[in-house]
Image: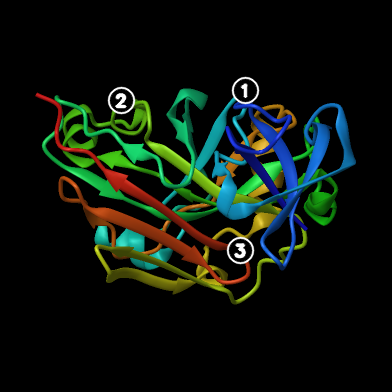
Amino acid sequence: MRIVRFASSQATGLGSDPAYGILNSSDEILVLKGDPMYSGIVPTETKVALSDVRLLAPIIPRSKVVCIGKNYADHAAEMDSVVPEEPIIFIKPNTTVIGPNETIQWPRMSERVDFEGELAVVIGRICKDVPKERFRDVIYGYTIGNDVTARDLQKKDGQWSRAKGFDTFCPLGPWIETEFDPQEQLLTTSVDGEVKQSEPISSMIFKIPEIIAFVTSVMTLLPGDVILTGTPAGIGPMREGSQVVVTIEGIGSLMNKVSARAK
């Protein structure tokens, strides 16, 4: 099931306020009442065409985006780093989140802004100290993320908070796929049509059960929290005005453009 969050000024009775829906194979959205993370969802009888709406980020975390660093061996190597012995975690504020087709804003204090395509896990319930064998119990579904990074500031600061924390630096979408089962699916990232990253998500050093167990051993996760599971090798800069597309087989594609650098 594909859960979308959308806005429409054309669909009768919906207005421009965000709404949730289920996207079917005919590109129709069955409008839902409620919030899938908190109040639950109830189908209505209203349907709208995907072409008549604007897709938003499928979830805006009320709490946090937890990221896993250096979770692909080839990416660790390209960063001149050793493979970590345990997951490296850091936080992106929820204000970084934008949706599909929205614009990544290039901050004036950075000279280099990079893409990092990633599989994203959406948490569906409050959880702490989750055993690896019960990881599925706390997952609502999966989506696609782009851990946008001001690479020059990351190097300058020696830590990652500023470099990864700018508004618009966490595109998510295009929807939450609740029936996705991470196996050998290919993750690709292209910039202006040129493929930059291409690797199966099975290449992750720490798999989803280990990530869930480790993160929840450190902190409580809340419904709607998102975990970015790491990026493969091939990261690199996005030019001003470029278009970046992250695709994961079985989920879909997340497209965003990059603004000109702020003056």
Q: Relative to the observer, which residue lies in front, 105 or 101? A: 101
> Label 3 sits on what residue type?
Ile
Q: Residue at x 79, y 36 (%)?
A: 36
Q: Residue at x 77, y 62 (%)?
A: 179
Residue 77 location (% of width, % of height): 29, 63
The N terminus lies in which quarter of the figure?
Answer: bottom right
Instruction: Choose the circle earlier in sequence order: 3 or 1.
Output: 1
In 3D space, how far apart are the residues under numbered discs 1 and 2 (Cα atoms)? 18 Å
Instruction: Choose the circle earlier in sequence order: 2 or 3.
Output: 2
Q: Mark 3 touching mark 1, by CB under 8 A?
A: no
Identify the secondary structure beneath mark 3: loop
In 3D space, how far apart are the residues under numbered discs 3 and 1 (Cα atoms)? 24 Å
Q: Mark 1 touching mark 2, by CB under 8 A?
A: no
Q: Nearer the viewer, mark 2 or mark 3?
A: 3
Residue 40 location (% of width, % of height): 87, 33
> Label 1 sits on what residue type?
Ser
Q: Residue at x 71, y 27 (%)?
A: 220
Q: Is 176 left, or right, of 89 in this rendering?
A: right
- Residue 27 appears in which quarter of the rendering? bottom right
Circle on res. 162:
2
In this picture, is 127 found above or below 209? above
- Few, some or many C-alpha atoms within 10 Å of disc 1 (few <14, some 14-19, many ≥20)? some
Identify the secondary structure beneath mark 1: loop
Instruction: Choose the circle earlier in sequence order: 1 or 2.
Output: 1
Residue at image mark 3: 251
Q: Relative to the observer, which residue lies in front, 101 or 238? A: 101
Identify the secondary structure beneath mark 2: helix
Residue 71 can be seen in this image: yes
Q: Relative to the observer, which residue lies in front, 194 or 118? A: 194
Residue at image mark 1: 63
